[in-house]
């Protein structure tokens, strides 16, 4: 599971849309790098509070180990 959460911080809608597009591109690139290893990769983009969204994803997908990047520009 590769996920990214875009915070709802009151920014203009155009900025948020640009960020969502950027995140989609980054997740697709990360997925492409991992696919040669033969693992199933699911990607998801969410909007909201990062902590709450990551915990929800962990619950829904029964994930027990979580790695967090603090710089969204450097996923891999």
Image (cartoon, grey):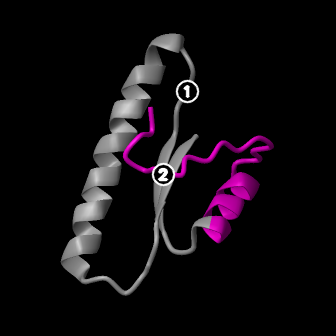
Residue 57 in percent (x, y) is at 65, 56
- Could you say which is closer to the camera, residue 7 or residue 60? 7
Q: Is residue 67 left or right of residue 74?
A: right
Residue 35 coordinates in the image, percent (x, y) = 45, 20
Residue occupying image coordinates x 53% and y 52%: 70
Furthest residue in direction front, as rendered: 71
Q: Which of the 4 quarters of the picture holds residue 18?
A: bottom left
Q: Main secondary structure of the magenta part?
A: loop
**Who's the residue at 44% across and 31% down the image?**
76
Residue 48 appears at what percent x and percent y? 51, 74
Check disc 2 and report its element: helix, strand or loop: strand
Closer to the camera in the image, 62 or 74? 74
* Residue at the bottom extreme, as displayed: 10
Q: What is the crowding at mark 1: few (fewer than 14 residues within 10 Å), some, or many (at least 20)?
A: few
Which of the labelled discs sits on residue 44, or is there none? 2
Furthest residue to the right? 64
How far separated are the C-alphas under marks 2 and 1? 13 Å
- In the image, residue 5 sits, relative to residue 7, either above or below, namely above
62 sits left or right of 40 in the view: right
Q: Is residue 49 above or below residue 30?
A: below
Residue range (magenta): 51-76
Which dot marks residue 70?
none
The quadrant in which residue 55 appears is bottom right
Secondary structure beneath label 1: loop
Q: Is residue 17 left or right of residue 30?
A: left
Where does the image place residue 67, in percent across and percent down from the top left?
A: 66, 42
| Picture layout, residue 48 above or below residue 73 | below
Identify residue for label 1. 40
Quadrant assignment for the N terminus: top right
Number of other residues with Cα within 10 Å of mark 2, as a class: few under 14, some 14 to 19, many 20 or more: few
């Amino acid at each position: 599971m590769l996920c990214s959460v875009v915070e709802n911080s009151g920014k203009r809608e155009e900025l948020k849309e640009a960020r969502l597009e950027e995140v989609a591109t980054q997740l697709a690139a990360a997925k492409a790098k991992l696919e040669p290893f033969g693992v199933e990769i699911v990607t998801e983009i969410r909007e909201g509070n990062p902590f709450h969204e990551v915990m929800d994803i962990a619950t829904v997908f029964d994930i027990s180990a979580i790695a967090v990047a603090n710089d969204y520009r450097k996923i891999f």
